[in-house]
Image (spheres, rainbow, N blue to C red):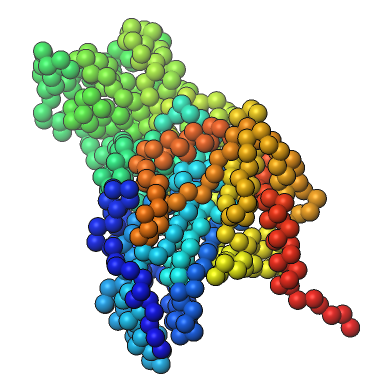
Amino acid sequence: MEAAGAANGPKKNDDQRNNGAKIDGPTNPMVTPLLTDLYQFTMAYAYWKAGKHNERAVFDLYFRKNPFGGEYTIFAGLEDCIRFVAHFSLTEDEIAFVRATLPASCEDGFFDYLQSVDCSDIEIYSISEGSVVFPKIPLMRVEGPIAVVQLLETPFVNLINYASLVATNAARHRFVAGKSKLLLEFGLRRAQGPDGGISASKYCYMGGFDATSNVAAGRLFGIPLRGTHSHAFVSSYMSPDEILEKSLHSHDGSTVCEDFVSLVQTWLSKLKWSKQLAGIFGETNQSELAAFTSYALAFPNNFLALVDTYDVVRSGIPNFCAVALALNDLGHKALGIRLDSGDLAYLSCEARKFFHSIEKEFGVPDFGRTSITASNDLNEETLDALNKQGHEIDAFGIGTHLVTCYAQPALGVVFKLVEINNQPRIKLSEDVSKVSIPCKKRCYRLYGKEGYPLVDIITGENEPSPKVGERILCRHPFNESKRAYVVPQKVEELLKCYWSGNTDKTREDLPSIKEIRNRCIEQLEQMRPDHMRRLNPTPYKVSVSAKLYDFIHFLWLNEAPVGELQ
Ligand SMILES: Nc1ncnc2c1ncn2[C@@H]1O[C@H](COP(=O)(O)OP(=O)(O)OP(=O)(O)O)[C@@H](O)[C@H]1O
Ligand SMILES: O=P(O)(O)OC[C@H]1O[C@H](OP(=O)(O)OP(=O)(O)O)[C@H](O)[C@@H]1O
Ligand SMILES: O=C(O)c1cccnc1
Ligand SMILES: [Mg+2]
């Protein structure tokens, strides 16, 4: 058998560039050509054996249903796919492993072919990362020698699936929390392994979170890092006597308070006997006070205290305030508190009242606005419930439900063959939603008069594009009666070239994570509100052109055998 793969041109894996910019390898070193399903290699062998491996195939990557009962999804993971193809090449060791894995009858020529395999003959058209996307629309269109494109299927689906799911989850949490709240991702300890944790931090930021507690993700992606302290820090203190170094410089460095611990005690008794706060608390927990004081000595300009270790109202809040007021005497501004248990709505309102009383009674400007962070098993529902009850929380720390995508653990991303050797292919199913849309296609987003996206339309590759001001018929791909004329006010082509192998075709730049996040936030803001609401959202319309509709149904009839009744 002849091995034809070597004709693929020189490998470019050493210094991959995109419009001059170097493309790094995959973020996770486990992302290699072996991170695929065995059947991709067995099919590659069978294609090769049949002399079919270089037949030109087009695959679409898409999903069928939006997650979390919603009507939108955030597309994420593209950059990691491009990094993967840019460096795609099997090492000798990897080929030896594949050889040892496949049946001994597999011919040597196949393994010579595997040595030559790279992505220099692959073209990838994709929707931009961070875009709002919908079911059935190809998110990526991957074209190239069939054996190579199949090897990409599993890693691509893997890289897109969780990234898009968790970015969507983050966007949904942001939607419920509101624009003005600070959203902190605290999920690393509960994520599905190290890669789950790193990916969650990256894609939650993309989906609209403000910061993460995950230090490695902060370093890798430049995501802002934020954090408070834990109950262990509070309960590790037994009494104020443990604090030996008690001096603290004022904010401007001009004076030194030699005994900050006493200053805190003075403020605590002032609070206890104050007009407004009298009777709210008596003796606070002194070990908690010691922990707060010690933390303030370590971070006088970033003092944030976890106030629920012993009793939020009778101990945590007054103790925090005593330390914050002592800091204030020295010109330092405390950041705030974190609540991690109990009724977060009620406790946040109690804390706010306390802060306002202090601002009024002691004339400390802005003390009433001291920040309140809440955490503890938060999710979309609890955020929604808190909003309905009314609360005074400024920041939410969210872990488990966010990063594990507790409400829906997978997005059903698929990768389907739509054309081979210029011949359109279709996959039929009893379930209409699973019938694939054949042909190499183009996709457009059509905007209406009010500036909202109205409909996405898929056309054949060679059809003329929709034009601004020109009426176009948009048809549901599978339901004959569902169709509408649209006169778009703006037309946006969705699939853009992100990889063109070793051709000179211009490629889109890979934007920074911040730019992707901005795109995501902007696009979400542009959506019509009824598509976004949590309860019974209106589905966004995804359609095909009249020509593509006719072709799908012609091919469907052609491929489906006619049954015989007896
Ligand atoms: N006002 C509220 N409305 C609705 N849900 C709330 C409200 N306040 C807190 N919650 C949620 O209720 C749940 C309380 O959980 P749980 O009873 O396990 O915690 P807890 O007893 O308060 O604290 P701990 O985790 O220390 O045991 C959490 O999921 C929290 O997010
Ligand atoms: O609740 P999540 O959304 O996952 O957010 C992260 C949680 O992790 C931390 O405590 P941990 O859960 O480790 O301990 P605790 O709940 O017992 O305090 C933190 O205090 C949060 O409660
Ligand atoms: O910084 C925090 O408060 C934090 C970080 C991770 C998990 N829980 C809380
Ligand atoms: Mg917890």
Question: Which residue is pictured at 29% across the width and 41% down the height?
Answer: 222
Answer above or below: position of 561 versus 449. below
| Left or right: where 518 falls relative to 223 | right
Question: Which residue is pictured at 28% across the width and 32% down the height?
Answer: 288
Residue 335 in the image, given as x and y percentages of width and height: 31, 25
Quick one: quadrant of the C terminus? Answer: bottom right
Q: Nearer the viewer, residue 339 or 112?
A: 112
Q: Quadrant of residue 290?
A: top left
Residue 228 in the image, given as x and y percentages of width and height: 31, 35
Question: Which residue is pictured at 34% across the width and 76% down the height?
Answer: 6
Answer above or below: position of 284 versus 276. below
Q: Is residue 62 visible?
A: yes
Answer above or below: position of 311 versus 188. above
Residue 494 in the image, given as x and y percentages of width and height: 53, 46
Answer above or below: position of 500 versus 376. below
Question: Which residue is pictured at 53% across the width and 36% down the height?
Answer: 524
Q: Is residue 154 visible?
A: no
Q: Nearer the viewer, residue 134 or 561?
A: 561
| Left or right: where 302 falls relative to 396 | left
Total labels drawn: 0
Quick one: quadrant of the N terminus? Answer: bottom left
Q: Nearer the viewer, residue 528 or 330?
A: 528
Q: Quadrant of residue 368?
A: top left
Residue at the bottom extreme, as displayed: 105
| Left or right: where 177 falls relative to 264 | right
